[in-house]
Amino acid sequence: MKIIIDDLTSPLIADFLAQHLDDMRSVSPPESSHALDIEALKSPEITFWSVWEGDKLAGCAAIKELSPDHAEIKSMRTASEFRKKGVASLLLEHILNISNERGYKRISLETGSMSFFHAAHRLYEKYGFVFCSPFGEYKEDPYSKFMSKELCND
């Protein structure tokens, strides 16, 4: 599988992200859905990656720089045909490596609290993320869980 920085111009990516937004909106109330649309993902403080197996889109993920030492994971998703094949772990390891290279001291994320998100919680915990209080501009929300990981980038 190949991970690339994606310019978000492909119709395949646009459709994939539209499905992601639809899924997030189907399980979270509008005020609690923090997934970004394709235009928001084009912001200069966001780096967006897609992962491919040949010409098949296997998944995507992004990080948003919150400050010079803190980043947030955004829009992590695996295509249904690639679930349980290590795509999420591959992307998360890539994000952690890039975050260390950039000198971030902490990486955080917001995800849902419902059972739909439990597999994501387990994945992040496996990589050393712990549940935390809201960060950045987030507020306490019964539909959100917040996780963070301190990075060692000596």
Image (tube, grey):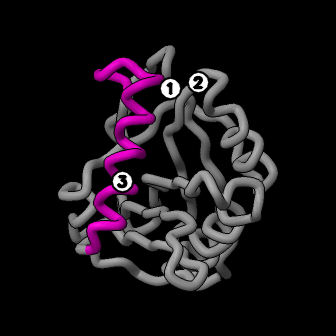
Q: Identify the element where label 2 is drawn.
A: loop
Q: Which residue is mark 2?
A: 113
Q: What residue is at 45 percent from the left and 18 percent from the top?
A: 141
Q: What residue is at 62 percent from the left and 33 percent from the top?
A: 117
Q: Identify the element where label 1 is drawn.
A: strand
- Whichever of labels 3 and 1 marks the residue nearer the N terminus, that label is 3
Which SS does the magenta portion mostly show? helix
At label 1, the amino acid type is: Ser
Q: Which mark is residue 39?
A: none
C-alpha separation, residue under disc 3 versus residue under disc 1:
20 Å
Q: Is residue 31 magenta?
A: yes
C-alpha separation, residue under disc 1 versus residue under disc 2:
5 Å
Q: Foreground residue, 22 or 145?
A: 22
At label 3, the amino acid type is: Leu
Q: Is residue 8 above or below residue 18?
A: below
The magenta region covers: 10-32
Q: Are marks 1 and 2 in contact (CB under 8 Å)?
A: yes
Q: Position of residue 97 (x, y in %)?
A: 63, 77
Q: Quadrant of residue 46?
A: bottom left
The quadrant the C terminus occupies is bottom right
Front tag of 3 and 2: 3
Residue 93 shown left or right of residue 68 in the figure: right
Q: Position of residue 91 (x, y in %)?
A: 61, 68
Q: Which mark is residue 144?
A: 1
Q: What residue is at 61 percent from the left and 34 percent from the top?
A: 132
At label 2, the amino acid type is: Ser
Q: Which residue is mark 3?
A: 17
Residue 40 shown left or right of residue 70 in the figure: left
